[in-house]
Image (cartoon, rainbow, N blue to C red):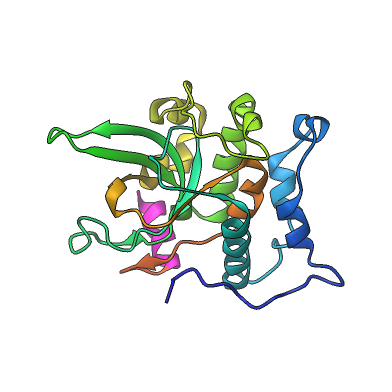
């Protein structure tokens, strides 16, 4: 049984507002004036219970994002199954369904490829929103290029060092930086910019630790 499950059909009032939002294609003027923080705060998921809104958010992401089997590239956002990390037994905890802002691909000293990403699930909601919003505003031209549909190209400007330089140190970014083995990634979806306000509401499926424990680890980091 997949760990991301599709919930039964749920409506908000008389209309399935979330479905309308996730399918919306934005025109040039809307993209120009788009404010990510407002889209997050005004999302119909905002006042829903955490578990419910996470299930609904995953449902919409998987239905409306682009599935890919390629490497994750810097500047792109992905969600995927990662149920069997290489060091599973040694890890104190891990997220089986990460939401990743990819920051690069490296080769280790053993000449194997690893993907580096910032997993937004490791941050409490207020920090997650600040990270997403600030990153979007600084790199807006890049995100706007793939606003309605993602492009499978690497950003020439986004990296771990650049991200650290623009985000307040109080966000403790390093806690969310993780390395992934490409061949261990399961089904993977690349997320267009228009779906980031929905992706924000997903939560990780953590093994060996609960969500409150993860946030405690972040505060101590």
Left or right of 135? Residue 70 is left
The correct choice, above or below, for 202 with respect to 128 in the image is below
Q: Nearer the viewer, residue 221 or 9?
A: 9
Res 200 visible:
no
Position in image of residue 153 (x %, y %) = 49, 29
Image-quadrant location for residue 49: bottom right
Name the residue located 41 percent from the left edge and 40 percent from the top edge: 72
The correct choice, above or below, for 196 with respect to 169 in the image is below
Name the residue located 44 percent from the left edge and 66 percent from the top edge: 211
Image-quadrant location for residue 142: top right
In this figure, what is the number of numbered marks? 0
Image-quadrant location for residue 22: bottom right
Residue sticking out furthest to the top: 156
Q: Nearer the viewer, residue 169 or 53?
A: 53
Overall secondary structure of the magenta section: helix
Name the residue located 73 percent from the left edge and 47 percent from the top edge: 39
Position in image of residue 92 (x %, y %) = 25, 61
Q: Which residues are magenta?
A: 211-221
The quarter of the image holding the N terminus is bottom left
Indicate whether residue 130 is drawn in magenta: no
Res 54 visible:
yes
Position in image of residue 129 (x %, y %) = 60, 47
């Amino acid at each position: 049984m997949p760990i991301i499950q599709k919930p039964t059909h749920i409506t908000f009032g008389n209309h399935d507002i979330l479905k309308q939002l996730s399918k919306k294609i934005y025109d040039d003027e809307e993209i120009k004036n788009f404010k990510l923080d407002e889209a997050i705060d005004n999302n119909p998921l905002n006042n829903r219970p955490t578990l419910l809104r996470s299930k609904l958010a995953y449902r919409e992401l998987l239905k409306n994002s682009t599935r890919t089997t390629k490497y994750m590239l810097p500047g792109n956002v992905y969600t995927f199954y990662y149920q069997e990390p290489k060091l599973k037994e040694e890890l104190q905890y891990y997220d089986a369904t990460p939401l990743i802002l990819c920051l690069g691909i490296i080769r280790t000293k053993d000449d194997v490829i690893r993907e580096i990403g910032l997993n937004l699930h490791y941050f409490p909601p207020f920090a997650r929103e600040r990270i997403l919003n600030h990153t979007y505003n600084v790199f807006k031209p890049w995100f706007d290029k793939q606003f309605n549909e993602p492009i499978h190209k690497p950003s020439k400007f986004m990296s771990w060092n650049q991200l650290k330089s623009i985000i307040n140190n109080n966000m403790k970014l390093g806690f969310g930086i993780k390395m992934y083995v490409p061949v261990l990634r399961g089904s993977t979806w690349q997320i267009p910019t228009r779906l980031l306000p929905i992706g924000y509401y997903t939560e990780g499926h953590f093994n060996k630790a609960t969500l409150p424990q993860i946030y405690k680890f972040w505060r101590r980091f």
